[in-house]
Image (cartoon, rainbow, N blue to C red):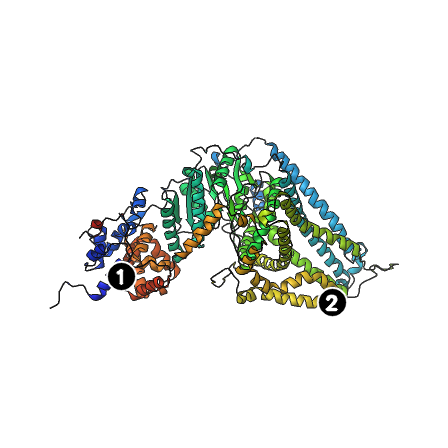
Amino acid sequence: MSNSNAVPEPLNESLSEYLAHLPMTDVQRAELASCTSFAELHERLSAQTVADPAEAAQASVERRLTLTTADELHEAEMLSVDASGRVRLKATPPIRRTKVVPEPWRTNILHRGWRRLTGKTNPPPPKDDLPRDLPKARWRTVGSIRRYILLILMLGQTIVAGFYMKGILPYQGWSLVSFDEISHQTLWQTAVQVMPYALQTSILLLFGILFCWVSAGFWTALMGFLELLTGRDKYRISGASAGNEPIEAGARTALVMPICNEDVPRVFAGLRATFESVKATGDLDRFDFFILSDSNETDICVAEQQAWLDVCRETGGFGKIFYRRRRRRVKRKSGNLDDFCRRWGGEYRYMVVLDADSVMSGECLTSLVRLMEATPDAGIIQTAPRASGMDTLYARMQQFATRVYGPLFTAGLHFWQLGESHYWGHNAIIRMKPFIEHCALAPLPGKGAFAGAILSHDFVEAALMRRAGWGVWIAYDLPGSYEELPPNLLDELKRDRRWCHGNLMNFRLFLVKGMHPVHRAVFLTGVMSYLSAPLWFFFLVLSTALLAVNTLMEPTYFMEPRQLYPLWPQWHPEKAVALFSTTVVLLFLPKLLSVILIWAKGATGYGGRIKVTMSMLLEMLFSMLLAPVRMIFHTRFVLAAFLGWAATWNSPQRDDDSTPWSEAVKRHGPQTLLGFCWALLVAWLNPSFLWWLVPIVGSLMLSIPVSVISSRTNLGLKARDTKLFLIPEEHTPPQELVSTDKYTHENRWHALNDGFVRAVVDPQQNALACALATSRHRHAEPIEWMRVERVRHAIKGGPELLNNHERLQLLSDPVALARLHELVWSEGNSAWLNAWRASVDADPHAPLLPLQPATHVNESTLVNA
């Protein structure tokens, strides 16, 4: 005779499986295994009676969450309840709002002029938002004088080079062209006569712009070399002058890390290394850490939540390390920072912005705070991040280049700009009050590709900070600031496409009222960083066109009626050699000076003098191969931005950082074809000219193998073993980078995959997701109806039929997520359970089942009937 109270076998099996994933003793599991339903199980876990069985899973969230972290969460007072009595995890501090109001942009100078003519003045800003009246500091005068000298050097050098270039071009004598005679000729005759001169004039103009751009880089590097060699600039902000006096209790600093669908193990490894380094200084009580997530991939969102809980538990960071995921992603990264400033910015004197790959030492961070305290007129102090941490051949060559050549250019920028310098958006300290009052960014007005949310916010924020009367400095000699570079060429180009569009957008602010001339120049240099590529490309195309004209068309020797002597094309090879030699010096002397500086100060960290010299020569060859490839890509990016093409680049998923041959062919194939066709055309026109074009067309034809081979990690590791492209951070790694590598490896070992499925099905992951969900509405019929529909759709369709938006809605709603969890288990939903089981089975590092209990769990609280 059967027992009428016996539990059906499927339910019994489900209960056993469920309990195996909760850390309990065998006695506790045996007691709970007698439950007749999952609603009863959740009631007994929560030790309370629930009126509605559908809400039972919500009631047990706290108990499921604290089975392994009860002591830490209770000691830090991390648990609370919302207005509806639901458990929530206090992942952020209490909100104390501050007004953050962006000023609308007035970019149209004609509109501003019309308003002034018609007597319509703009309303005055609030009294608190007026620019500061700074005392007349001597460095401002010195900086202006230096920049006038730089302008004279650039223009003087360009004029001389232009004179040489004009002498090199074969067709001389625009003055002999008779425009009166041209007006009586046919169109073809006019084209034949004038085209060579028009092409030469265009070439000369493009040459002047490009040479001036190269000259600016040369003088910047040269003064950086002298600055680093002597160290005698009394107007610099130096890390050596930071001192070690105690940091004032009121000088609280927030380290904020905006992230969006990043590599979660690496992000939280770098954060942990930075946190522990600050803790080692003894000044941890002056710092708080914020992870500001804009991620919208649900698997990544769940992984972030678990990683935050793990890092807090492992470092004792509850109450010091905070995590927030925005549900409404407005204005991208700048909007994320605006939201932080609006909610918690008033609680801090300073803010340090980190990138997802940033690592900073505690000494660097405390020195930045001390420098800010010692420089009351500084609004931003930017460090010079050192690239490290990558192993592919491409990344190691780029790391070497930035480590060896970068200090010259950074020190040179500081020499010319002083306190009106760059801000690169990360690894910098910002004075919070003026940033909140003056640096909020409104969208650019209008329609089209250059309207809307500002993409490259860093240059704009620096310009607004300076407009408000605060200095923007570069502490170029402050150690302990690190970042990572893209692992391969294609990943770098994907990043460049975003930066290109952002810098072109920023040029709309060139004539905004009140901007300092230096920051107008910064906007211009940002544009030229990418616009120089199409200018160079057009320069080469026009030079090829001039060759074609020279070869295929008969020169016009007599330009005027009754001209006595023919006008012969002129060739001056000595001028061509002199100009070529000068250009080579301007391009490559900064690299040689960098190596000379290393020789003078010690080359051990770079593998020795011979190795660093060999590395420099190989990097120069590699940069020559890549320059034409970048030129073509950047030209495409500029055209795409002006034509309004979508800035998307979908790459295939890969298990490492290498570039597959298929993707390389897809991305570089058109360039390779262009290189072959261009070489054939020039060889047909004039084979001797092909030798001048070989560095361009040869690089284009080799772009596919260069892109693939340079992305290989094994080649990068072999280069490191032979001390090629070695940098000090590899020779003697600082503790922060050692810790980052260690924690990244550990995090990848137990990385959470298929996060959304686990947040729905797994007992502990569901509890964490419910406790961190942010869509906490009071009871309302429309909201309740939407919840019911979402849960019904999820149960019916399973995880495969839910799109990412639907997943995000469920993940953000603690009530819907808890109901879905309870229904999946009580109904034995095979679609969800099988997906979860497959994920667990595929994890080679999943813990053994049943999970072991935490030592602090009290049995009586778990088996309360």
Residue 186 in view (yes/no): no
The type of residue carrying mark 1 is Glu
Q: CA distance from mark 1 to mark 2?
A: 77 Å
Q: Is residue 656 above or below residue 129?
A: below
Direction from residue 423 to residue 857 in the image, left or right? left
Q: Residues within 10 Å of mark 2 (few under 14, many from 20)?
A: some
Location of the N terminus (image quadrant): bottom left
Which amino acid is tagged 2? Leu
Q: Report x, y in % for residue 336.
A: 44, 48
**Can see residue 574?**
yes
Asked whether, in this view, residue 187 is left or right of residue 345, the answer is: right
Residue 451's tag is: none
Quadrant of the image occupied by residue 296: bottom left
Q: Residue at x 48, y 37 (%)?
A: 369
Q: In the rendering, at what x and y percent does residue 721 appear?
A: 55, 56
Which residue appears farthest toward the top when viewing the image? Answer: 135
Instruction: Give the labeled residue for mark 2.
Output: 685
Rendered location of residue 799, percent (x, y): 35, 63
Asked if the residues shown at circle 1 and circle 2 are in contact, with their CB atoms under 8 angstroms apart, the answer is no
Give the residue pinned by disc 1: 17
Q: x%, y% of residue 222? A: 66, 44
**Residue at left 61%, top 47%?**
603
Query: Is 536 situated left or right of 491 in this image?
Result: right
Q: Nearer the viewer, residue 308 or 669?
A: 308
Q: Which label lies toward us, 1 or 2?
A: 1
Q: Secondary structure at mark 2?
A: helix
Q: Secondary structure at mark 1?
A: helix
Residue 146: quadrant of the picture: top right
Comes first in the chain, label 1 or label 2: 1
Q: Name the residue at the right extreme.
A: 564
**Most foreground residue, 22 or 255:** 22
